[in-house]
């Protein structure tokens, strides 16, 4: 019998990459250590899925085993995504501190901006994950389930590990509004705390700027990272009569401020990390309160 066969519970390795670049890492700051710990704890929460599945089988019935596994597993996935966001953030900052005197300023601007945008991408991926975990968590409660299913009729009741795109929500205000309504209906203090904490991100100006950073790179026109790059508008101006034109001279594309871009990315990452910790701190109590069963000893 192998070591894996001797135990039904696999060993969980919670990962936080110091950097996406395979070179010796530099010391983590207290801020980075704090985010790293949140990422680890989220991943370690997924390690409870087997025991939680057994508890669900005993207290709730076999139909809830996969649902519990999916909730905790999605939280663990969000932990890895948060770890990747931290790695890209550290790589972005390296452009501002490592051999700064020898770097081409345009290269530094492009490097910081690229990694800052990756920070936003991974952070929002983790946020989408926690939104989906929360939606599924709420369905443990009868009143909350009725509210959630009414808000997302195309999800088909959120079957576990669904391949239906409509069963996977986005982290956006309308979804958070629906989860807050369902949490209120559940009367679960822990769940109300989680739903409010995640929802409150959208009322923070720093989060709004963070979303703008992601949106410019992901959907809309993204100005180049060099002065004079491709402009947002043509340098050719047509006269009012339409029979003549003028050509402007001088750069119309201004490179983004490297320090400001990095600050926006770090603020969003910090905000989400704090919200994610709140969810991780409350998820076990929420499962007990929503189900009305002592699945976890909190």
Image: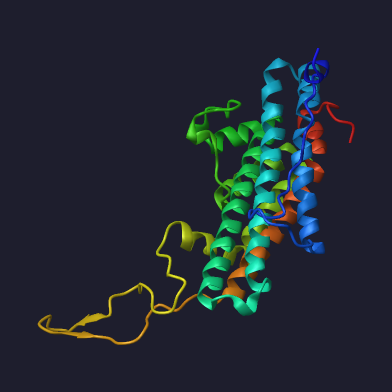
On the picture, is 276 further left or further right than 244?
right
Rendered residue at 28%/76% (across/down) = 234
Pick the residue in front: 206 or 218.
218
Tell me where residue 87 sits by quadrant: bottom right
Note whether 147 is above or below 240 in the view shown: above
Image-quadrant location for residue 192: top right
Give the percent coordinates (x, y) of residue 227. Answer: 43, 79
**Could you tell me how many numbered marks the image carries?**
0
* Lateral position of residue 90 relative to residue 216, left or right: right
Q: Looking at the image, which residue sits at the far top?
A: 1
The residue under the point 67% across, 44% down is 78
Query: Residue 268 location in percent, x, y?
Result: 65, 62
Q: Looking at this view, name the residue that lies furthest to the right.
A: 297
**Along the viewing direction, whichever of 29 and 24 lies nearer the viewer:** 24
Q: In terms of image quadrants, where is residue 66?
A: top right
Residue 204 in view (yes/no):
no
The residue located at (50%, 75%) in the rendering is 106
Give the image location of residue 138, x and y in percent. Answer: 68, 35
* Location of the N terminus (image quadrant): top right
**Left of 160 or right of it: where is 37?**
right
Residue 204: x and y, percent? 65, 64
Above or below, 176 against 232 in this view is above
Q: Considering the image in quadrants, where does the C terminus appear? A: top right
Is residue 111 shown above or below 52? below
The residue at 71%/39% (across/down) is 76
């Amino acid at each position: 019998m192998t070591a894996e066969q001797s135990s039904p519970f696999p060993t969980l390795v919670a990962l936080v990459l110091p950097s996406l670049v395979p070179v010796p890492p530099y010391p983590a700051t207290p801020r980075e250590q704090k985010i790293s710990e949140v990422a680890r704890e989220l991943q370690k929460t997924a390690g409870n899925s087997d025991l939680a599945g057994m508890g669900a089988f005993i207290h709730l019935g076999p139909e809830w085993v996969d649902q519990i596994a999916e909730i905790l597993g999605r939280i663990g996935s969000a932990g890895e995504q948060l770890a990747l966001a931290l790695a890209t953030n550290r790589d972005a900052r390296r452009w501002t501190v490592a051999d700064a005197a020898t770097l081409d300023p345009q290269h530094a601007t492009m490097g910081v901006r690229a990694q800052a945008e990756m920070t936003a991408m991974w952070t929002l991926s983790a946020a989408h994950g926690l939104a989906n975990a929360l939606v599924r968590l709420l369905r443990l409660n009868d009143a909350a389930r009725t509210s959630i299913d009414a808000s997302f009729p195309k999800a088909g009741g959120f079957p576990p590990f669904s391949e239906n795109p409509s069963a996977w929500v986005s982290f956006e205000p309308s979804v958070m509004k629906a989860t807050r309504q369902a949490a209120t209906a559940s009367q679960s203090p822990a769940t109300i705390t989680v739903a409010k904490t995640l929802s409150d991100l959208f009322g923070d100006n720093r989060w709004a700027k963070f979303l703008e950073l992601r949106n410019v790179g992901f959907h809309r026109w993204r100005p180049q990272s060099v002065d004079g790059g491709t402009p947002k508008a043509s340098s050719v101006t047509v006269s009012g009569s339409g029979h003549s034109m003028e050509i402007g001279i001088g750069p119309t594309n201004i490179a983004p401020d490297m320090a400001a871009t990095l600050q926006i990315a770090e603020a969003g990452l910090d905000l989400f990390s704090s919200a994610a910790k709140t969810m991780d701190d409350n998820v076990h109590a929420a499962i007990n309160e929503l189900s009305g069963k002592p699945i976890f000893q909190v």
